[in-house]
Amino acid sequence: MTLEEGCLSLKLECALRDLGFVEVQWRVIAHAGLFFVSPVGFYNFSLNDDLLGFQLSKHCPVAMEIRADCKILPTAKRALDLAFELSP
């Protein structure tokens, strides 16, 4: 799966749940409860890079880098489910 497919997957999950998301150039950042969800890849340089997973973080991922203190989940559905489960 590529980053482009990950972005489309996250947009679809947001549409199904009536959640908001923001597109910054080609990147997608979803707001779910207290958390932000975004697709991350190994390099994050282009849409054709391989998808590593979906990062769940409390801070908005501006630099789109993989952070050590954030969880990475395999699917957008699982990331959004966990975000709402952990939010009060």
Image (cartoon, helix red, strand yellow):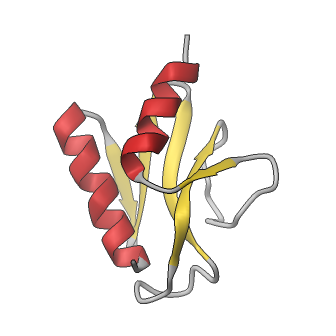
* Callout count: 0
The residue under the point 27% across, 54% down is 11
x, y percentage for residue 41?
A: 57, 74
Q: Left or right of 11: which side holds 73? A: right
The residue under the point 35% across, 65% down is 7
The residue under the point 23% across, 33% down is 17
Q: In which quarter of the image is the N terminus?
A: bottom left
Taking depth in this image into account, of 66 and 52 the one nearest to the observer is 52
Taking depth in this image into account, of 84 and 24 the one nearest to the observer is 84
Q: Left or right of 72: which side holds 39? A: left
x, y percentage for residue 58?
A: 65, 36
Does 87 appear above or below 16? above
The residue under the point 40% across, 50% down is 76
Taking depth in this image into account, of 61 and 54 the one nearest to the observer is 54
x, y percentage for residue 28?
A: 40, 60
Q: In which quarter of the image is the C terminus?
A: top right
Quadrant location of residue 24?
bottom left
x, y percentage for residue 59?
A: 66, 41
Q: Residue furthest right?
A: 68
Does 48 appear above or below 56? below
